[in-house]
């Protein structure tokens, strides 16, 4: 009996030994295959693509090879794995978050989805981002409104440098900006847009309290300078509605307003280096386009006071007018006309109306023979009355009193020769013989 028991025990031991031997035989290849992840998990027979990146995630570097830091095998020994923890917890095991209370989180960060942007094994881009430049990665989520679709891209966006302005994880500023919109633009790139200093005094910026995006798009635009609308629409629709109404109701519009840049042809958008945000001093600005007038004024010996004082808006409106040449009131457009005070409204803003209405005057005009008002004789001749334009030129002349050298009448140019004396003068034209007048010692005039 004892012998039988010994035989049974020996048989059981043999069976157990065989089982253990079989177990070892089966398990050994698997153990060898997975006991060293750096040599097995990424071998050519398994997952070699995981390590074919320029930048490898720390646990995957050849000297570390700790795949099981993030992956845990499932029970059953069938070579199935799960993440050792949730995606967020795994990442935060090494990458501690430092978002202060109240910071705005990037949506993937808020949802614990780090792998939306980062590859967990490695990448050919720094920080293991899935795509580069950043704009390609950003557009994976922002595809409902792609970052770049328009004619003019913002330089950082055009280069795909989204992180030039935005933080990838969190920020205390809206849209994950690196700082406030205004400071971001002025400090990082557009330093020239800061307040200018004139005569030692810093000038206040136009729209100083506004964000730049009130006028400019942050990523791209179909308008120059990344404007959100055309310059005219932006200025006139958003702020200067009174000027818009004036332009729309005007019969004659300033040509500059019909150009692509419109308002900014003449005005600076950001600072008031000159009055009215003008790009140059007023008359200098006008003469930039009106070169013919500039040449006339420069060459003339006698200049009309508004021209000599560089005061174009004494007579002209800058945006639009009901009157030709953008004049702010009526001025005769022909050389002959029946006298009507309304037609002389421009002249009468500076000159006294009596100089043409009264036949005899004492000192209302120097153009008189004794007390006889010679302006009156020229103007008050029915429909053949001479207008101011017939004898005077508006900006400047080489003859005293701004007398023209010639005037166009009836299709031909009539010469005018005027000579000034201390107490009067003489005039010779194609209209009449030479006449002389004297305020102190009147000369007999056949026209009287």
Image (tube, grey):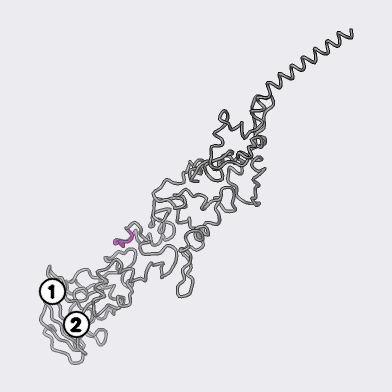
| Residue 1 on the magenta span | no
> With 256 as the anchor, is 48 left or right in this view?
right
Q: Nearer the viewer, residue 245 or 153?
A: 153
Relative to 301, residue 228 above or below = above
Q: Nearer the viewer, residue 54 or 307?
A: 54
Furthest toward the right, the residue is 2
Residue 326 horizontal/vertical position (percent): 30, 66
| Residue 256 on the magenta span | yes
Secondary structure of residue under mark 2: helix
Report crowding for label 2: few under 14, some 14 to 19, many 20 or more residues within 10 A (C-alpha): many
Q: Quadrant of residue 224?
A: bottom left
Magenta region, residue range: 251-257
Residue 214 horizontal/vertical position (percent): 47, 56
Q: Quadrant of residue 440?
A: bottom left
Q: Nearer the viewer, residue 80 or 190?
A: 80
In the rendered image, is residue 379 in sight? no
> With 279 as the anchor, is 324 left or right in this view?
left
Quadrant position of the C terminus in the picture:
bottom left
Please tell me whether mark 1 or mark 2 is closer to you in this view: 1
Residue 374 disc label: 2
Q: Are marks 1 and 2 in contact (CB under 8 Å)?
A: no
Relative to 87, residue 360 above or below = below
Residue 119 horizontal/vertical position (percent): 56, 39
Report crowding for label 1: few under 14, some 14 to 19, many 20 or more residues within 10 A (C-alpha): some
Secondary structure of residue under mark 1: strand
In the rendered image, is residue 145 in sight? yes
Residue that carries the numbered disc 1 in the rendered image: 414
Residue 56 horizontal/vertical position (percent): 57, 41
Query: Which residue shows up at 42% across the image and 62% down it?
Result: 269
Query: Which residue shows up at 59% across the image and 47% down it?
Result: 169
């Amino acid at each position: 009996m004892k012998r039988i028991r010994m035989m049974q025990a020996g048989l059981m031991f043999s069976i157990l030994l065989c089982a253990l031997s079989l177990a070892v035989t089966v398990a050994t290849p698997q153990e060898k295959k997975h006991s060293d992840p750096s040599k097995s998990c990424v071998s050519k027979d398994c997952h070699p693509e995981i390590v074919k990146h320029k930048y490898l995630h720390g646990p995957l570097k050849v000297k570390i090879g700790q795949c099981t830091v993030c992956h845990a095998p499932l029970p059953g020994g069938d070579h199935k794995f799960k993440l050792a923890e949730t995606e967020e917890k795994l990442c935060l095991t090494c990458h501690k978050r430092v978002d202060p209370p109240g910071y705005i989180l990037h949506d993937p960060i808020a949802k614990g989805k780090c792998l939306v942007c980062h590859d967990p094994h490695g990448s050919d881009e720094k920080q293991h981002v899935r795509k580069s430049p950043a704009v390609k990665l950003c557009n994976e989520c922002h595809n409902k409104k792609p970052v770049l679709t328009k004619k003019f891209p913002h330089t950082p966006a055009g280069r795909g440098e989204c992180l030039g302005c935005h933080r990838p994880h969190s920020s205390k500023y809206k849209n994950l900006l690196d700082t406030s919109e205004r400071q971001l633009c002025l400090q990082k790139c557009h330093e020239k847009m800061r307040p200018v200093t004139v005569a030692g005094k810093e000038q206040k910026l136009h729209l100083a309290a506004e964000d730049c995006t009130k006028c400019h798009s942050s990523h791209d635009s179909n308008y120059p300078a990344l404007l959100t609308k055309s310059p005219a629409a932006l200025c006139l629709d958003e702020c200067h509605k009174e000027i818009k109404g004036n332009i729309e109701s005007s019969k004659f519009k300033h040509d500059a307003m019909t150009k692509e840049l419109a308002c900014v042809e003449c005005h600076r958008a950001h600072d008031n280096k000159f009055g009215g945000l003008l790009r140059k001093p007023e008359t200098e600005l006008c003469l930039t386009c009106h070169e013919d007038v500039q040449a006339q004024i420069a060459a003339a010996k006698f200049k009309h006071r508004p021209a000599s004082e560089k005061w174009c808006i004494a007579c002209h409106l800058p945006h639009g007018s009901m009157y030709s040449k953008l004049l702010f009131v009526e001025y005769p457009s022909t050389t002959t006309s029946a006298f009507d005070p309304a037609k002389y409204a421009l002249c009468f803003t500076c000159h006294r109306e009596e100089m043409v209405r009264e036949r005899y005057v004492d000192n209302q005009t120097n153009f008189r023979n004794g007390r006889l008002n010679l302006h009156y004789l020229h103007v008050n001749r029915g429909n053949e009355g001479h207008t101011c334009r017939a004898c005077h030129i508006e900006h400047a002349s080489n003859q005293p009193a701004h007398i023209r050298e010639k005037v166009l009448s009836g299709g031909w140019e009539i010469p005018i020769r005027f000579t000034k004396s201390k107490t009067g003068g003489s005039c010779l034209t194609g209209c009449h013989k030479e006449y002389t007048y004297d305020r102190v010692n009147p000369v007999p005039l056949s026209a009287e």
